Amino acid sequence: MTKKILVSGAGGFIASHVVEKLLAQGHDVIGTVRNPTDSKKNAHLLDMAGAAEQLKLFAADLNDADPFNAHADVDCIMHMASPYSVNVKDPQKDLVDPAISGTISMLKAASANPRVKRVVLTSSMAAITDEPDGRVLTEADWNTKSSLTRNPYYFSKAKAEQAAWDFMKNEKPAFDLVVINPFLVVGPSHTSQINPSNQVLADIVNGAYPAIMALTWGFVDVRDVADAHIAAMQTADASGRFICASATMDMAGVIDIMKKNGYARAKLPKIRLTGAIGTMIMKLASLTQPAGVGSYLRTHLGRVPRFNNAKARSDLGIWFRDVEGSIKDSLVDLAKWGHIPPAQG
Ligand code: NAP
């Protein structure tokens, strides 16, 4: 059945894949962006198949009071807008405030509209863990360690998701809340704007990393994250949180894939600092980095995240793409947009 769906931050890396899929399924989409009259920034949305008939864009800034109220006469809401940056000047003002107030504003708007049956909130693995500690993480885990000075982006995601669950408990609205918690999202982008997650891959190719470090990421493909959002909307008995991640891969593994796919002669890091001493050196070096990057490195170097994605597979029916394929597709896309050089022979 065709539905009307509100997608906040509709032009974003993940959200634009969600919008594309919703339009392809014949749904009407109300997309919020910061500036709907910016035809250049919104071109990727406006040019999508079905957009002319099914997509309407409206302005909503998370820093405004009640940005979503006028647009919430819909069947379902995907709240995806949230500031995503590892380094900011003022973590409270630039990350935490808009993440929380935007989420609460959206939930209030949903409460005021009896038509809304479900809100799907894009949270993050950052709301589940601040630093991997060897345990297998599940949806029962919460990040309680981040702060304004330690992984502040993580702090903003944990606080915003917690605020959403508190709202549901205290207000008992008529709709239900389903939360998607993706790990590092990579894959093709609808725009030339590079997302901080794909930036990790571009930085490795472009020589921004001084050495091969003991960093391991949980990867997930943006197309699978979009499918998870849509399944969360369409699966009547979906409930709670969903870890959205395929598998982990360390930096050495990522570099091997890059070498096999035309980047053997790129500026890939060569010195291996993955052992205990190397990790100690890199932790010391992290003190010279901007605060956000520094705290990320100190909490992640030498640690391997472990997680269980069974709930997303069983309840939402998501079959996660393998990491190697997602990284290959990301490299092709990053080269297409000019973020990395073209692959060579
Ligand atoms: P993105 O492209 O930066 O998307 C973030 C969206 O939020 C953009 O549309 C952005 O609008 C919007 N936004 C930020 N600040 C805003 C403000 N003050 N007012 C209105 N809109 C604002 O990044 P993404 O990866 O697609 O992120 C989408 C969601 O997924 C976010 O909630 C993010 O925390 C979450 N997430 C991402 C990852 C990942 O690895 N990429 C992993 C886990 C969770 P502009 O385009 O105008 O800036």
Image (spheres, rainbow, N blue to C red):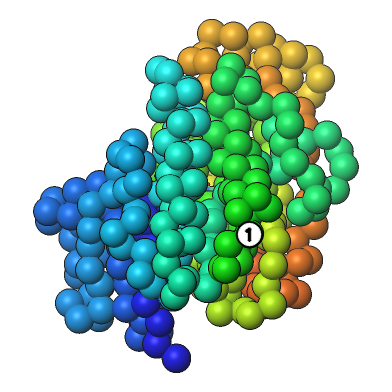
316 left or right, relative to 206: right
Asked if residue 311 lies left or right of residue 197, the reply is right
- Residue under label 1: 172
Does residue 188 sit above or below 295 in this rendering?
below
Callout 1: SS: loop
- Image coordinates of residue 319 in percent, x first then y, are 66, 73
- Asked whether 335 or 61 is in front, the reply is 61
Residue drawn at (35%, 70%) of the image = 73
Residue 113 vs 274, above or below: the answer is below
Question: Dividing the picture into quarters, in which one does residue 189 lie?
Answer: bottom left
Q: Residue furthest bottom?
A: 1
The number of callouts visible is: 1
Q: Residue at x 66, y 9 (%)?
A: 284
Q: Can you see residue 263?
A: no
Horizontal and vertical percent for residue 266? 44, 38
Where residue 69 sits: x, y (%)?
34, 56
Image quarter hosting the N terminus: bottom left
Can you name the residue that lies furthest to the right here?
Answer: 135
Q: Residue at x 85, y 48 (%)?
A: 136
Give the amino acid at mark 1: Lys
**Frontmost residue, 271 versus 10:** 10
Q: Position of residue 66 (x, y in %)?
A: 35, 46
192 with respect to 290 (left or right) = left
Is the CB of the residue bearing disc 1 within 8 angstroms of ligand 1? no
Looking at the image, which is closer to me, 264 or 207?
207
